[in-house]
């Protein structure tokens, strides 16, 4: 399993792993892939700085990446308090009443935090500034093309810049603005995702951007067979995410047993694409919380970042409650394959072994 991206990044396998857990990201990097730390959860740049220092010290000198969320069509300034003034009372009342109906208890006195400020453009810029003080080799933007000055600054520092795309026209726009790598994220993926399935999207984007621009296939990838399929569609590597939620290292970030119970029992049909998590379409586990937003009389989700500010405290309470029937959890349709909790190194080894077996089988079919 070797493509030009392996040489470009100095990695053994073209497996890129997005995760909010530094422990998972570091473990993937040590196992030969490229761990990519999601930065959106960091409200405090100093905390991100400490976390990336930990990454620098725990990746055996091997490369890693970071992922930021830099939306382009929202207010670029303002605190969560300022923006909260734009949240209708109707929405606040709905959230409070829904939590009560679902039996979600309040957090203990003094616990909780404000909405995730990483959704704000200004905070995402601070994440980039902090990352450039460390040694990532890749910076990815989850919500389109980063600003031109950010692209130029990162490339001048020697980083490659990647951006997610859910349609060929988006990929072409990224390339026109100087993005180095396109992540073709299909409909099956967890979190923010478009409307085109990976089997169609990946070759469409590969053809749209041409052979000089590397493409990573994303969405519905959790096995070696699926990696082989993505590379067969023209991708030079894969961008994985949901599959790492089911690892032992992830417990260092999320000790909530409700998450594990929820995904261990879920099937591939137990997800829903909805705007209730951030205001933009994102795939989540289908639970009583997501279903409440679909009931008659429920308000429409607010635009980003207001929706996140609206539900941030609710998500803290839901996660703390540990109720798998209510949990708010971004995850892709690959969740149906996440039926046990394993170490990252074991997951990586299985991905590589199954890929090699799949390629060998295809060679036999082709008579090679």
Image (tube, grey):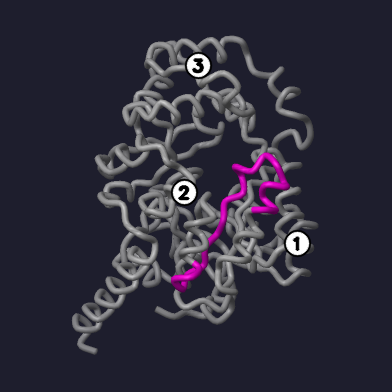
Residue 19 place in picture, x, y as percent: 50, 53
Is 12 situated above or below 201? below
Provide the residue span drawn in magenta: 29-50
Q: Furthest residue to the bottom?
A: 368
Residues under labels 1 and 2: Cα distance?
25 Å
Q: Mark 1 highlights which residue?
A: 133
Viewport quadrant of the N terminus? bottom left
Is 305 situated above or below 10? above
In the image, 72: left or right of 355? right
Quadrant of res 320: top left
- Towards the viewer: 50 or 170: 50
User: Which sits earlier in the primary sequence, circle 2 or circle 3?
Assistant: 3
Residue 332 place in picture, x, y as percent: 38, 46
- For residue 95, which numbered disc appears in the image? 3
User: Looking at the image, is mark 2 or mark 3 nearer the viewer?
Assistant: 2
Q: Tag count in the figure?
A: 3
- Towards the viewer: 128 or 305: 128
Q: Give the secondary structure at mark 3.
A: helix
Q: Are marks 1 and 2 in contact (CB under 8 Å)?
A: no
């Amino acid at each position: 399993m070797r493509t030009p991206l392996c040489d470009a990044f100095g990695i053994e396998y073209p497996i890129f792993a997005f995760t909010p857990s530094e422990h998972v990201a570091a473990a993937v990097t040590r196992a030969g892939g490229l761990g990519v730390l999601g930065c959106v959860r960091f409200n405090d740049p100093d905390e991100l700085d400490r976390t990336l220092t930990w990454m620098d010290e725990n990746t055996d000198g091997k490369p890693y990446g970071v992922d930021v969320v830099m939306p382009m069509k929202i207010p670029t300034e303002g605190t969560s308090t300022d923006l909260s003034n734009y949240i209708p009372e109707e929405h606040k009342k709905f959230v409070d009443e829904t939590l009560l109906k679902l039996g979600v208890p309040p957090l203990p006195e003094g616990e909780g935090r404000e909405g995730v400020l990483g959704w704000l453009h200004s905070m995402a810029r601070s994440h980039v500034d902090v990352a450039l003080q460390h040694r990532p080799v890749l910076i990815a933007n989850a919500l389109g093309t980063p600003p031109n000055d950010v692209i130029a600054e990162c490339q001048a520092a020697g980083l490659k810049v990647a951006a997610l795309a859910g349609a060929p026209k988006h990929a072409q726009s990224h390339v026109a603005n100087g993005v180095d790598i396109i992540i073709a994220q299909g409909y099956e993926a967890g979190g923010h995702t478009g409307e085109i399935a990976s089997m169609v999207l990946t070759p469409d984007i590969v053809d749209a951007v041409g052979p000089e621009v590397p493409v990573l296939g994303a969405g519905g990838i959790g096995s070696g067979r699926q990696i082989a399929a993505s590379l067969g569609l023209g991708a030079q590597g894969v961008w994985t995410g949901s599959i790492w939620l089911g690892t032992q290292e992830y417990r260092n970030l999320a000790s909530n047993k409700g998450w594990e119970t929820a995904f261990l029992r879920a099937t591939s049909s137990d997800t829903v694409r909805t705007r209730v998590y951030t205001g933009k379409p994102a795939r989540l586990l289908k639970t009583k919380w997501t279903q409440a937003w679909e009931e008659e009389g429920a308000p429409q989700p607010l635009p980003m970042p207001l929706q996140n500010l609206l539900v941030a405290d609710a998500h803290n309470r839901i996660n703390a409650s540990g109720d798998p029937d209510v949990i708010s959890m971004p995850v892709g349709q690959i969740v149906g394959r996440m039926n046990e909790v394993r170490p990252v190194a074991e997951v990586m080894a299985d991905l590589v072994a199954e890929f090699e077996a799949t390629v060998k089988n295809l060679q036999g079919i082709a008579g090679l």
